[in-house]
Image (cartoon, rainbow, N blue to C red):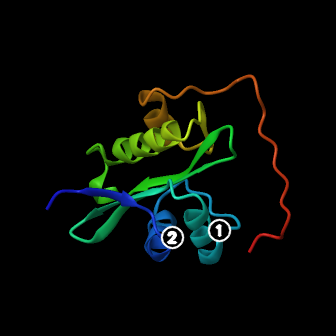
Amino acid sequence: MPIEILPFTPEDVGEALALWRRSEGIGLFGESPERLAACVRSQPLSLIAREDGLLIGAVLCTHDGRRGYLHHLAVAETHRRHGIGRRLVQGCISALGRIGIPRCHLFVHRGNAAALAFWSLSGWTERKDVVMMSRDLVPEG
């Protein structure tokens, strides 16, 4: 059966969380099933990949009205290097373009060499002119 790229729905959150927890380099601080379901409900741009009904890839796609953001792109280890990640990203980029978003950002943990290579080979460039700063608003856990 072919791999299907589908809209990410609130019903997919549990499977996506399980995939992300199995995937190295994915930071899930503050990500609860309720918050994720609200995210995909309020901004229906995120995508999943399924094969024979099994969720094998997922990416969150959001925007702030000016810029798009990709979060938590992951493909099951057994299905990597088959273009699934590229298909998920291209679907998100197309969706952002349809609503007039001209630029997209993403975040990669500096030590995640595989992700840095993927994004670089996919045409993304590292920004050296900005520094990301964060502040936790709730305790971790």
Q: Quadrant of residue 11?
A: bottom left
Q: Residue at x 46, y 68 (%)?
A: 9
Residue highlighted by disc 2: 17
Q: Nearer the viewer, residue 38 or 127?
A: 38
Residue furthest toward the left? 1
> What residue type is disc 1 on?
Glu
Query: How far apart are labels 2 and 1 at the CA level?
Result: 9 Å
> What residue type is disc 2 on?
Leu
| 72 to 118, vertically: above or below | below
> Which numbered disc covers residue 72?
none
Q: Quadrant of residue 112?
A: top right
Q: Quadrant of residue 125?
A: top right
Helix, strand or loop at label 1? It is loop
Circle 2 residues within 10 Å: few <14, some 14–19, many ≥20 = some
Residue 27: x percent and y percent? 62, 58
| 40 to 132, vertically: above or below | below
Residue 63: x percent and y percent? 63, 47
Q: Residue at x 49, y 63 (%)?
A: 20
> Which numbered disc covers residue 31?
1
| Residue 76 shows up from this direction | no
Residue 110: x percent and y percent? 63, 40
| 119 to 18, vertically: above or below | above
| 14 to 99, vertically: above or below | below
Q: Residue at x 65, y 68 (%)?
A: 31
Residue contact between numbered discs 2 and 1, judged by CB atoms under 8 Å: yes
Q: Nearer the viewer, residue 3 or 43?
A: 43
Residue 38: x percent and y percent? 62, 70
